[in-house]
Image (cartoon, grey):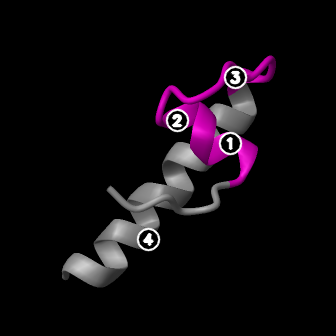
């Protein structure tokens, strides 16, 4: 298993750490979805 350095929002999305701001969580989710769409399609 590889360890990748993640920003706090990404760690929150993956359940690594709790984030007090739900909007930051949503932004991270959108960022990751956009990233995946870009590389899958």
Q: Nearer the viewer, residue 37 or 6?
A: 6
Residue 13 marker: 2
Q: Nearer the viewer, mark 3 or mark 1?
A: 1
Q: Quadrant of the N terminus?
A: bottom left
Residue 22 marker: 3
Magenta range is 7-22
Q: Quadrant of the C terminus?
A: bottom left
Magenta span includes 14: yes
Mark 4 → mark 2, Cα distance in angstroms: 14 Å
Q: Is residue 16 above or below residue 30?
A: above
Q: Is residue 14 left or right of residue 40?
A: right
Q: Nearer the viewer, residue 20 or 34?
A: 20
Residue 9 marker: 1
Mark 3 → mark 4, Cα distance in angstroms: 20 Å
Q: Secondary structure at mark 4?
A: helix
Mark 3 → mark 1, Cα distance in angstroms: 10 Å
């Amino acid at each position: 298993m590889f360890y990748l350095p993640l920003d706090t929002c990404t760690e929150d999305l993956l359940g690594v750490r709790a984030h007090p701001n739900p909007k930051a969580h949503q932004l991270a989710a959108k960022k990751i979805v956009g990233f995946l769409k870009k590389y899958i399609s």
